[in-house]
Amino acid sequence: MTAIASGSDLYTVGAGTFFGQIAGLRSKLKINRVENFVLELGKYMESKNVSFDWENVNSEDFGDFFEELLASIAKTNSKNKLDRFKRLLFSQIEKPADPDMASRYLVLTSVLDDGHILILNHFFMLERKLHSYRKSLEDLQTYANNLLVNGHTASELESWFEYTHPEKHNKAESLASVIQFYKAKLDLIGKKRENLFNQFDEGELRYLTNDLKTRGLLMTNDGTMGSLRKGAIFGHHSISAFGTGYMEYVNDI
């Protein structure tokens, strides 16, 4: 005698079939993502003269790294993140990092979203130059003012500048033009900061910045409280050596 399935049994069978179909579709999707990535790699290699260290590429460490990378690629459809994975892979081909460090970079590339990278790239490209620009400007202005206060003429000031900065003077750059150069750079960084602020609300900016700190990519500047307020974030933080290493590794191809 054939047993009649109860309503709950039918529901369980139907749900099982439904989730089984989802699992099958997800598996196909992940396979397609990996296949598309590999095809893009082939096109990239044809467009660039990639220098292979075959001993490295054939090593067990690189094989483990590549396997981890493909598993990560299967989990994302973000074009920007896929581009970062591609740069990460070719960095590991051309200038391989220590396996443990390469694995850390891979994990970071998996978990950092475009907002993280936007903030980190700002620190990497601009903020670490700010202190150098500011110090150069202050040194020039302080010394020049001291000379003028002590009765030196503008001509003598230019002679001092020619003597202390021959690399600038040889390019026919005057003291005034160099001072203006540093002021313009500082002004540009200020405008870039404002543009970055406008892309996030304050809560999101705090979260992303704090997350970058937690992961060791940003650090609190000495003598500050590490404030995460919009107006204080850049004055209170800077990119760490680890963060710089990561950005150089992901960007340098």
Image (cartoon, rainbow, N blue to C red):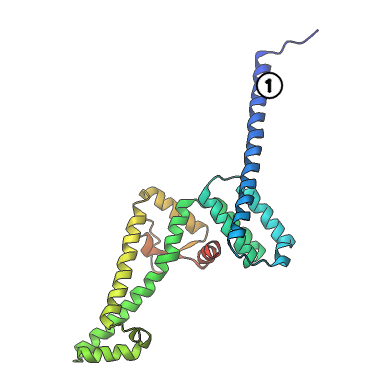
Query: Which kind of residue does numbered mark 1 sit on?
Result: Val
Q: Residue at x 67, y 66 (%)?
A: 52
Q: Quadrant of the C terminus?
A: bottom right
What is the x, y in percent for residue 140?
Answer: 30, 82
What is the x, y in percent for residue 18?
Answer: 64, 26
The answer to whether residue 11 is above or below residue 173 is above
- Which residue reaches farthest right? 1
Q: Residue at x 65, y 17 (%)?
A: 8
Quarter of the image for residue 29 reads top right
The answer to whether residue 234 is above or below residue 134 is above
Q: Quadrant of the N terminus?
A: top right
Q: Residue at x 31, y 61 (%)?
A: 191
Task: Report if residue 189 is visible in the image.
Answer: yes
The answer to whether residue 7 is above or below residue 41 is above
Determine whether, in the image, residue 220 is placed left or right of residue 101: left
What is the x, y in percent for residue 184?
Answer: 30, 70
Q: Which residue is denoted by mark 1 in the rendering?
A: 13
The secondary structure type at the circle numbered 1 is helix
- Which residue reaches farthest front? 46
